[in-house]
Image (cartoon, rainbow, N blue to C red):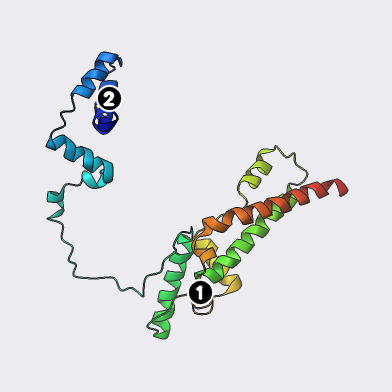
Amino acid sequence: MKKHIATICILWVAGFLSAQTITPELLNQLQASYQGNAHDRAIENALGQTPINNLIVNQANLLPVDHHFTYRVPQQGITNQKKSGRCWLFCGLNIIRADIMRHHDIKELELSETYLFFYDQLEKSNFFLENIISTRKLPADSREVDYLMHNPIGDGGGWTGVTDLVAKYGLVPNSCMQERLIAENTAQYRPIIQTKLKEFALEIRDSKASD
């Protein structure tokens, strides 16, 4: 039974959708439906090693697709956010750097995403603590405090975040502050910052008794 799990699961779903009761007889029927021939083994091997989205692609439908274009959008080099949620920051800085390159006739330029990401995290940490201060007298189980403590800081942002950061902190080229592992793989350090922010939040809330 275990060897033929893929085929049996598909047939089980079909039986379920037709509202059949699963009985020992039905299970025996499902198992017997597997013939073990070359066709069935090929399907079993494919399902075991290949994502099903790749298996269901109809290659014949791909042939008529024309991958040649008369116009190609110019690009100024590819940037990589790696394993982080900084897509909004990369997108915004790529738009800005394209204008800088055209205006100053620069062939190659990458703005430092790490530079602005540092200040983004600093601003978000400060915003979190300011909210903790303003809610320090609320009960610990209030919805607002609960939300803050579960969401102290994150990677996400948007276009207004980019413009606000640039207006306040400016821009530097990537050569001045290059990518670091801590920025490329934020999942590794995020729990540490979140834990420290929560510790600070508890200290702030404990201090309300002395107000």
Q: Can residue 45 be seen in this view?
A: yes
User: Closest to the observer: 206 or 184?
Assistant: 184
- The residue lying at 71 percent from left, 51 percent from top is 199
Q: Is mark 2 on a helix, strand or loop?
A: helix
Quadrant in which the N terminus is drawn = top left
The residue depicted at 27 percent of the width and 24 percent of the height is 12
Crowd tier of the residue under label 2, counting other residues whose Cα lies within 10 Å: few below 14, some 14–19, many 20 or above: some
Q: Is residue 70 left or right of residue 181?
A: left
Vertical order, 112 against 35 (above or below): below
Label 1 SS: loop
Circle 1: residue type: Gln
Residue pictured at 48% horizontal, 59% vertical: 84
| x, y percent for residue 39 | 13, 37
Residue hosting label 2: 12
* Residue 164 in picture, x, y percent from top left: 57, 66
> What residue do we see at 54% from left, 62% from top?
161
